[in-house]
Amino acid sequence: MNTHIDLRPVSVERRTDGSGPRVLLLHGLAAGDSVWDRTLPLLPDTYQLWTARLPWRTETIADWGEQPNLRGWLAKALTAVPGGPEVVVAHSMAANVLLDLLDQKQRGGVDALRRFGIRALVLVSPFYRADAQEFDWNTISYYLNDFHLIMEEGIRAHSGGRFSADVQHAMGLRVRDRVGPYGWFRFFDLYLRTPTLETGRITVPTLVLGGEADFAARPEESLALARALPDAAARVLAGGHFPMLEAAEDFAAEVSSFVNSTVGLPLQRKAAPLNALEPQR
């Protein structure tokens, strides 16, 4: 059994042999590239699929939370894909780091989308509020004192609920403690800055996917973000914060349909029936 832990802050791995569009999948806070394992086999085998391991992953690279700029780590993942990813699928906090990166003014007048060759985005369970007034003291208390519940949700979704409530709770606390106060602050700082995002800069087609029972990044935030972007649609799928695990067939069907319509590749696998809301603009 391979017990080796990859200590590189950022790495990418090619997961399929397809010669079609290059798709890079980015995991959220205290997760890992295994979060995509249920979805990958359901995507067209013509895609060239890549997954990234980022500093805020499950095993947590020491001191990542003390770094003020997470954009640089994400840029390394984007540039590590040969030719650059044409489509980026980003979950949870990674979606917010990606938005932060794309919001930055680039040298020489070249925007980040052109710099990295990104043609389309899929943002999964992003945290977004359009107005600073939507943040209050209760919001801070909720995300600080109940932060371990988000970690528990990830454990439940990954395990299929096979752990007892007590074991799941203890594991959630351990993961929260590994993330630590600095990691939490990096997450919440990104969230607080969403009202200032220049969303008009993100001009590529974008699909925003949320979970109808998501208590962390509520589905109305996905709908609000889609409305704020120039060319975006939103779908709300069954399940909570991890639709790629809890509604893998619907999730893969949505991603496949979107990639095929934006990058122009004909669908190679039959899409599963959808249980989603109509697109929101």
Image (tube, helix red, strand yellow):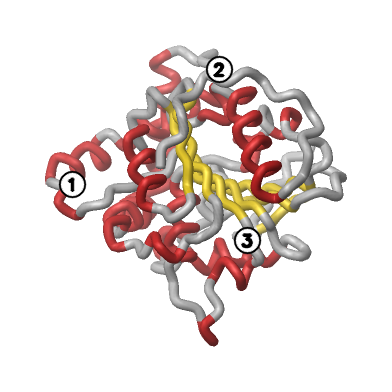
Q: Earlier in the sequence, mark 2 or mark 3?
A: 3
Q: Nearer the viewer, mark 1 or mark 2?
A: 1
Residue drawn at (55%, 64%) of the image: 73
Few, some or many C-alpha atoms within 10 Å of disc 1 (few <14, some 14-19, many ≥20)?
Answer: few
Residue at which label 3 appears:
118
Q: Earlier in the sequence, mark 1 or mark 2?
A: 1
Q: For the residue marked with disc 1, what is the amino acid?
A: Glu
Q: Is residue 249 at least partly visible in the picture?
A: yes
Point out residue 230 in the picture as x, y percentages from the top left corner: 43, 55
Q: For the residue marked with disc 2, what is the amino acid?
A: Gly
Q: Nearer the viewer, residue 202 or 56?
A: 202
Q: Which mark is residue 228?
A: none
Q: Is residue 171 at least partly visible in the picture?
A: no
Q: For the residue marked with disc 3, what is the amino acid?
A: Ile
Point out residue 239 in the picture as x, y percentages from the top left corner: 46, 22
Residue at which label 1 appears:
134
Callout 3 secondary element: loop
Point out residue 94 in the picture as x, y percentages from the top left corner: 49, 51
Q: CA distance from mark 1 to mark 2?
A: 34 Å
Point out residue 98 in the picture as x, y percentages from the top left corner: 49, 58
Few, some or many C-alpha atoms within 10 Å of disc 2 (few <14, some 14-19, many ≥20)?
Answer: few
Residue drawn at (49%, 36%) of the image: 209
Q: Which mark is residue 160?
A: 2
Q: Nearer the viewer, mark 1 or mark 3?
A: 3
Q: Is residue 107 above or below residue 130?
A: below
